[in-house]
């Protein structure tokens, strides 16, 4: 479950395919999880009205910048992010160190740049992987006989019965402290949600008129799914994925904060917040800047997801 | 109605079984030798073998699973390697603290976010709405642990308005009866203890609630807008209803159904995020316990926590479902007319 | 007092200001153009026209239900001016002096509130005690033919059929004893059998209670048995306003003639093409019937 978007459960496929539990009334918005909570910027979007395009552009630009920083971060860093310089410990932000230094004398800005990769790219990787798994499993479920489909959904339910943070924490702990284990843990925590969602989308499409006419014309189900339904549904999948990035960033930071993930002296933003914690009263910058970075990333990707959603869903397109 | 509850109960039990199974497989993921870890670092080969036998690790996997299942159902989750006490007893001391935090947070969220969303909808696109919506966006993206640290620094450390950490000030802890400090202090008949417990909960609850307030407020706002634009509100206005009646009597009633559902779903997330906040404020809840267990590589404790949290969440979801059926007539209707395929 | 008409609309114009338009047009959009209409006590007047003719906007203007449009001219309800009146005064009028019945009874009722609650609402708003309000609600529902009204006060809208729901809506509209009831397409969402029941009900209540009715509809056929007078609207203007029999027997305006002629008849020759309103108007223009009544635009449109 993601922080900034609603859990992928407020549409008709929440906890079981045949769940008698009724859904709250759907709004006209197509992607109900985002619709009900509104995505981060639904409110902002209406707010800006004709300037909604500006908001989208800001979101895209900031997100792109973040990705660039994530990839090239270490190269851009003015100082070595990992080299301890005890004599420079806890310097306040100034000309030499724009964001000050931490308790080991390392430049905070450099560490932020270095850690961007770990936090952001890892989060993107997690989402990409879990989406991939989700799509594959969802396709399998849709094409399988009822019993298999139901079983797969039950398995998803079981995983979703555990809050994702807890599940990820448990798995990551069991696997040992490393970036890989965190990524794996998060993928395991997130795939059921994606699966449910994709399956819901696919099911609706598979039951629609154009698929029926294809079948009547003798086209078999698997090719139909792969060549027609799937590409049509990918838009919604992309939107959901981009929104999940926001949540994944925060989740990963949270896990890092708790000490799970790449071991110190990792520059993972969550870990940085944890490291700087004890100095908050004397050196606020050590913990504040990483936290700010996480916040900005979460908001930017969330707005990005929202921008995508509006662009890709024609029914939501409003006049600019 | 009864059949529905029975069905949901069945589903819930299935979920619990599923959780137990998942957790079991997680124990098998641990690299290295669990027996060795249990026996301790300085153990001899004999002691390790004994540990293996004691833990039942020499049995085939299926048998291990059944043993695990049996133990779990009987309430035996093994022993914590760090506290050397049964995991269950550790947890029974810590679970109430976390639950209390989550419940207080939820109440806080509802009290603040629902009116905020409603007012935002009623004053659509005017200044208060606009600023509220910006606030929602910001609150939605902030990581709770960072917010917790900032609150701790700002309100507790710098301004000194509220306590920095812990569940109670020194000497103010009520005798533990239920484990919920608020309840216990009431049971002990001590208002100062109650006030003290409460004051220790305010900052953690506020920090924890931020992203949830954002979600709930946005949800209330969008539902309320839907209600305000509806025909039945027009009809009510044509009967002479004023804005207060429209928003409070018609609007809120309409939106509460889906808001409740949303709250119920957020419960699980909140429990997860509570771990982070507990860690910052040093509250003796599952979060702190779990965090310690993770750092000490105390696997039984970790997995016991996961299990318990999962069960708690399942129970909470069940309760939310039943409450929703009970309160929202639309929902009652659709399931009673056999929405089950 | 009794001579004051229940409703007196004079030169009412309803406009959507340019700034708030959501479509692609420019400038102010005039929905209702200098409309005048008078309804006396107990009189039943039908306001007829196609979709978009402005009839619903006129009706809503009486209660000022739509806050987004600009009103100019005069609308007097039982002598009290509505245009420009403060909201509080309007709230007093709504429900007790004038009330409205909407087109779709399902959406007009709040699904999470009981029908008892919604029927008694006009009374409760005015401070009537709960028990009294309940009693009156039961009485009203009984009058309107809702079976076992007393026991069903706690029921929810979805438990009722369409026709019953419309009765519930009417009960709510009539409970505070209004002088004028505005019925906006009250039968459009219902099937034919039920339509007749509702119309009969409307007529009966009007007679018994001395209630004036403004019936908004696009269906001329249902007007005949119910209305005393008929006003025909087109493009925001009233083109004809006559007693019902006169209108049906000898319509003056080409548009009215078109409307009447286009009503399919059971007895008509099946081989003759059904006439559209435009067909008839064109024929009239060609025959130069009542050229004085044809505005330039009408003449333009009517040209083949």
Image (cartoon, coloured by chain):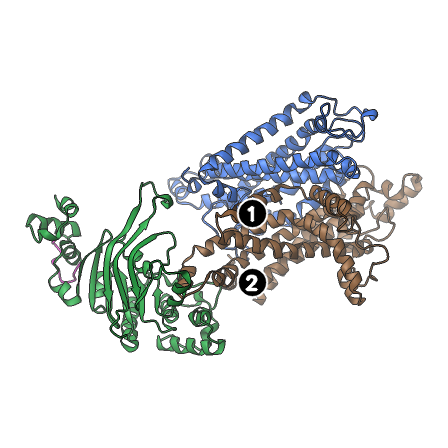
Chain colours: A blue, B brown, C green
Q: Quadrant of residue A21?
A: bottom right
Q: Quadrant of the N terminus of chain B?
A: bottom right
Magenta segment, which residues? Answer: C264-272
Q: Residue at x 59, y 53 (%)?
A: B113
The percent position of residue C13, horizontal first and vertical second, equals: 28, 53
Q: Quadrant of residue C71?
A: bottom left
C218 on left or right of A74:
left
Q: Quadrant of residue C270?
A: bottom left
Res. B272 mark: none
Mark 2 — on which chain does it sit? B
Front residue of B184/B300: it is: B184
Secondary structure type for disc 2: helix
Disc 1 packing (10 Å; few <14; some 14–19; many ≥20):
many
Res. B132 mark: 1
Sequence order check: which comes first, mark 1 or mark 2?
1
Q: CA distance from mark 1 to mark 2?
A: 31 Å
C36 on left or right of B283:
left
Question: Label 2 belongs to which residue?
Answer: B325
| Residue C269 inside the magenta-drawn segment | yes
The percent position of residue A100, horizontal first and vertical second, equals: 74, 29
The answer to whether residue B331 is above or below residue A37 is below
| Residue C191 inside the magenta-drawn segment | no
Mark 1 — on which chain does it sit? B
The percent position of residue A165, horizontal first and vertical second, equals: 69, 44
Magenta: predominant secondary structure element?
Answer: loop
Q: Residue at x 47, y 73 (%)?
A: C127
The answer to whether residue B261 is above or below residue A101 is below
The answer to whether residue B37 is above or below residue C7 is above
Front residue of C207/C79: it is: C79
């Amino acid at each position: 479950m993601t922080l900034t978007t609603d859990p992928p459960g407020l549409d008709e496929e929440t906890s079981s395919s045949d769940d008698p539990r009724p859904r709250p009334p759907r709004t006209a918005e197509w992607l109900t999880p985002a619709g009900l909570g509104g995505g981060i910027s639904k409110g902002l979007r209406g707010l800006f009205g004709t300037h909604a395009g500006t908001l989208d552009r800001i979101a895209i630009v900031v997100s792109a910048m973040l990705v660039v920083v994530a990839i090239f971060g270490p190269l851009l860093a003015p100082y070595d992010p990992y080299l301890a310089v005890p004599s420079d410990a806890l310097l306040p932000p100034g000309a030499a160190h724009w964001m000050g230094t931490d308790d080991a004398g390392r430049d905070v800005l450099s560490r932020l740049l270095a850690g961007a990769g770990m936090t952001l790219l890892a989060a993107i990787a997690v989402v990409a992987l879990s989406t991939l798994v989700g799509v594959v499993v969802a396709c399998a479920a849709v094409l399988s006989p009822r019993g298999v489909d139901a079983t797969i959904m039950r398995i998803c339910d079981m995983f979703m019965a555990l809050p994702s943070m807890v599940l990820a924490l448990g798995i990551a702990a069991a696997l040992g402290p490393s970036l890989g284990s965190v990524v794996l843990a998060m993928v395991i925590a997130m795939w059921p949600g994606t699966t449910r969602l994709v399956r819901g989308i696919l099911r609706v499409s598979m039951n629609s008129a154009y698929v029926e006419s294809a079948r009547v014309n003798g086209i078999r189900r698997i090719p139909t799914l792969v060549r027609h339904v799937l590409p049509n549904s990918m838009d919604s999948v992309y939107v959901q994925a981009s929104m999940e990035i926001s949540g994944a960033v925060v989740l990963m930071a949270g896990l890092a904060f708790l000490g799970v993930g790449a071991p110190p002296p990792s520059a993972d933003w969550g870990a940085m917040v944890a490291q700087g914690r004890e100095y908050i009263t004397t050196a606020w910058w050590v913990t504040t800047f990483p936290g700010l970075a996480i916040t900005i990333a979460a908001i930017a990707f969330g707005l990005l997801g929202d921008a995508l959603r509006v662009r890709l869903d024609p029914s939501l397109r409003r006049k600019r | 109605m009864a059949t529905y509850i029975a069905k949901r109960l069945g589903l819930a039990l299935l979920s619990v079984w599923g959780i137990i199974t998942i957790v079991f497989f997680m124990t098998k993921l641990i690299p290295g030798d669990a027996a060795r870890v249990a026996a301790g670092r300085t153990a001899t080969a004999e002691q390790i073998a004994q540990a293996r036998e004691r833990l039942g690790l020499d049995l085939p996997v299926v048998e291990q699973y059944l043993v695990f299942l049996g133990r779990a159902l009987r309430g035996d989750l093994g022993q914590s390697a760090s506290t050397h006490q049964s995991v269950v007893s550790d947890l029974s001391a810590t679970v109430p603290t976390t639950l209390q935090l989550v419940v207080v947070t939820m109440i806080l969220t509802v009290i603040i976010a629902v009116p905020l969303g409603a007012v935002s909808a009623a004053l659509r696109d005017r200044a208060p709405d606009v600023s509220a919506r910006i606030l929602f966006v910001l609150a939605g993206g902030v990581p709770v642990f960072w917010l917790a640290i900032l609150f701790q620094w700002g309100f507790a450390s710098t301004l000194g308005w509220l306590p920095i950490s812990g569940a109670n000030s020194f000497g103010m802890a009520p005798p533990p009866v239920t484990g919920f400090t608020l309840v216990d202090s009431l049971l002990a008949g001590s208002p100062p203890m109650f006030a003290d417990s409460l004051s220790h909960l305010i900052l953690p609850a506020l920090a924890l609630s931020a992203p949830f307030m954002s979600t709930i407020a946005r949800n209330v706002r969008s539902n309320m807008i839907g209600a305000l634009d509806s025909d039945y509100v027009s009809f009510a206005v044509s009967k002479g209803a004023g804005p207060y009646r429209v928003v409070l009597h018609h609007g809120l009633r309409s939106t509460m159904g889906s808001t409740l559902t949303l709250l119920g779903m957020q419960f699980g997330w909140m429990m997860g995020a509570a771990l982070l906040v507990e860690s910052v404020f040093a509250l003796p809840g599952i979060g702190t316990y779990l965090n310690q267990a993770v750092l000490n590589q105390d696997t039984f404790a970790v997995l016991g926590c996961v299990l318990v949290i999962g069960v708690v969440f399942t129970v909470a979801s069940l309760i939310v479902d039943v409450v929703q059926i009970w309160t929202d007539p639309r929902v009652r209707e659709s399931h009673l007319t056999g929405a089950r395929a | 007092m009794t001579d004051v008409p229940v409703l007196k609309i004079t030169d009412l114009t309803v406009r959507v200001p340019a700034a708030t338009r959501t479509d692609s047009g420019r400038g102010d959009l005039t929905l209702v153009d200098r409309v005048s209409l008078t309804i006396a006590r107990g009189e039943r007047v039908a306001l007829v026209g196609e979709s978009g003719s402005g009839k619903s906007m006129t009706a809503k203007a009486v209660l000022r239900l739509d806050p987004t449009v600009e009103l100019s001219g005069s609308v007097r309800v039982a002598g009290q001016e509505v245009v420009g009146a403060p909201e509080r005064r309007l709230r007093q009028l709504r429900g007790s002096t004038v009330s409205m019945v909407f087109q779709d009874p399902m959406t007009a009722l709040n699904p999470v509130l009981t029908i008892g609650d919604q029927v008694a609402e006009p009374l409760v708003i005015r401070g009537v005690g709960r028990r009294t309000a309940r009693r009156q609600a039961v009485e009203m529902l009984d009058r309107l033919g809702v079976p076992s009204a007393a026991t069903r006060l706690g029921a929810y809208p979805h438990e009722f059929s369409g026709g019953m729901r419309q009765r519930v809506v009417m009960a709510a509209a009539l409970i505070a004893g209004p002088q004028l009831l505005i019925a906006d397409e009250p039968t459009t969402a219902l099937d034919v059998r039920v339509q007749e029941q509702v119309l009969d009900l409307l007529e009966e209540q009007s007679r018994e209670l001395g209630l004036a009715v403004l019936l908004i509809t696009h269906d001329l056929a249902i007007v005949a048995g119910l209305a005393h007078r008929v006003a025909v609207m087109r493009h925001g203007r009233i083109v004809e306003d006559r007693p019902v029999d006169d209108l049906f027997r000898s319509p003056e305006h080409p548009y009215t003639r078109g409307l009447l002629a286009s009503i399919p008849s059971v007895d008509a020759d099946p081989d003759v093409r059904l006439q559209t309103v435009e067909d008839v108007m064109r024929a009239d223009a060609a025959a130069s019937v009542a050229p004085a009544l044809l505005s330039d635009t009408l003449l333009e449109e009517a040209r083949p």
